[in-house]
Image (cartoon, rainbow, N blue to C red):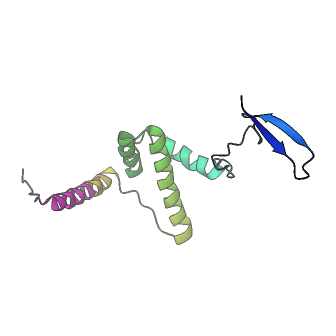
Amino acid sequence: MPKLELIFPNGKLKKTLPAGFVLHPANINPERKIKRRTKKGHTKAGQIFRNAAYSLTKSRHTAIGAFYHRIKAKKRPVIAIKATARKIAILYYNIMTKGIQFVEKGIAAYQQKVNEQQLKHLQKQAKQLGLELLTMIP
């Protein structure tokens, strides 16, 4: 095994170290940056909004419940609960700060809005591909 020599500035002290000797603490890797951020915790307010979102998981008659089910179909239930909690938190913030009245419009209005968004997205994609969408009358 090759040896490394460590010569101190005064030139008098010499130490011979093995090549694999670590001159830094074991928990620090010199090749990567040290993380200085602490882990994020869960706040009480966040837990309240997540509990409110969880209570809407069984709801089939509200727009927020339909939002949860739509996100859950695309992603996992945990992500859907977090997204629903965020939606509830935004509604709460708007009600408290701006005084906006919240009226639950129901699942039909929400479904109509989602369908309009999907149609707008399809029209944009068709335009990019050089195609044209035609409406069919049943």
The magenta segment is: 117-138
Q: Is residue 106 left or right of residue 45?
A: left
* Above or below, comparing residue 78 to residue 113 in the picture: above
Residue drawn at (24%, 58%), measured in percent from left and top?
Answer: 121
- State the image coordinates of residue 74 (x, y, percent, origin top left): 36, 42
Please state the horizontal and vertical placement of residue 75, each as a whole percent of the image.
40, 41
Residue 94 horizontal side relative to residue 131, left or right:
right
Magenta segment includes 118: yes
Residue at the bottom extreme of this rendering? 98
Quadrant assignment, res 127: bottom left
Q: Find residue 131 and report its image quarter.
A: bottom left
- Looking at the image, can residue 56 be seen? no
Q: Residue furthest left?
A: 137
Residue 133 is left or right of residue 99, and the answer is left
The answer, for residue 110, to whether it is visible in the render is yes
Instruction: Indicate whether residue 81 is drawn in magenta.
Output: no
Residue 111: image location, x then y, percent:
29, 52
- Residue positioned 56% across, 66% down in the render: 96
Count all numbered tags in the image, as a single digit: 0
Q: Hey, which residue is sitting farthest front in the picture?
A: 11
Quarter holding the N terminus is top right
Q: Nearer the viewer, residue 27 or 62?
A: 27
Q: Nearer the viewer, residue 82 or 1?
A: 1
State the image coordinates of residue 79 (x, y, percent, origin top left): 46, 43
